[in-house]
Image: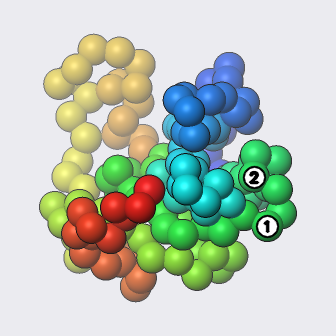
């Protein structure tokens, strides 16, 4: 089940940017997602992270804008399972039948086995730390996760 829309924004929300040659970023409310092109086949792309809840439309429109309608998403790589990095996973996986990769230590949080521990707002200074108890920390459950040996993505 998708998380509800969260009214959190940065000034760059919706703005795309080139992070490096063949690496394109998109700010989705308070998080960034990245598209990485295969240099040998520019229409092949991997997506790094899945943004905020209800952001799938923004992500897919940016992919089409950058790569045209004939691009092929080959995989999604998640840096971790926080709500602002997996928010659109459910919607994206309905559109794209691709493998999803995440570090094994993060796997319990994306396979429904464990919730993230409670936030510690006093552990760090700053507004995000103070707001962290309000953020979702429940596990999500995605059945498509696979172990990611280095060689699986060697062509990217």
| Quadrant of the frame with the N terminus | bottom right
The answer to whether the residue labelled 1 contacts the one labelled 2, judged by CB atoms less than 8 Å apart, is yes
**Which residue is located at x 31 percent, y 78 percent?**
146
Marking on residue 103: none
* Residue at the spot of label 2: 67
Where in the figure is residue 73, as x and y percent of width and height?
Answer: 61, 67
Where in the figure is residue 80, as x and y percent of width and height?
Answer: 32, 53
**Which residue is located at x 16 percent, y 61 percent?**
105
Q: Is residue 36 above or below residue 86?
A: above
Residue 52 visible at all: no
Q: Is residue 20 above or below residue 39?
A: above
Q: Is residue 121 above or below residue 118?
A: above
- Mark 2 Cα shell of 10 Å, populated few (<14), some (14-19), many (≥20): some
Relative horizontal placement of residue 95, taking residue 41 as reference (left or right): right
The front one of 45 and 85 is 45
Relative horizontal placement of residue 55, taking residue 75 as reference (left or right): right
Residue 77 visible at all: yes
- Looking at the image, which residue sits at the far front? 40
User: Tag 2's secondary structure?
Assistant: helix
Where in the figure is residue 38, as x and y percent of width and height?
Answer: 54, 55
| Quadrant of the frame with the C terminus | bottom left
* Residue at the spot of label 1: 70
**Which residue is located at x 58 percent, y 81 percent?**
97
User: Tag 1's secondary structure?
Assistant: loop
Where in the figure is residue 142, as x and y percent of width and height?
Answer: 42, 78
């Amino acid at each position: 089940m998708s998380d509800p829309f969260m009214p959190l924004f940065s000034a760059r929300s919706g703005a795309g940017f080139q992070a490096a040659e063949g690496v394109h970023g998109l700010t989705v409310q308070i998080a960034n997602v990245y598209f990485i092109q295969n240099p040998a086949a520019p229409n092949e792309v991997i997506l790094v992270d899945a943004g905020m809840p209800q952001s799938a439309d923004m992500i897919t429109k940016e992919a089409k804008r950058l790569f045209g309608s004939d691009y092929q998403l080959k995989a999604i790589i998640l840096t971790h399972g926080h709500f602002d990095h997996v928010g659109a996973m459910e919607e994206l996986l309905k559109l794209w039948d691709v493998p999803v990769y995440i570090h094994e230590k993060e796997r319990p949080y994306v396979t429904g086995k464990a919730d993230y521990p409670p936030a510690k707002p006093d552990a760090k200074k700053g507004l995000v730390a103070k707001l962290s108890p309000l953020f979702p920390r429940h596990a999500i459950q995605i059945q498509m996760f696979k172990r990611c040996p280095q060689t699986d993505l060697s062509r990217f």
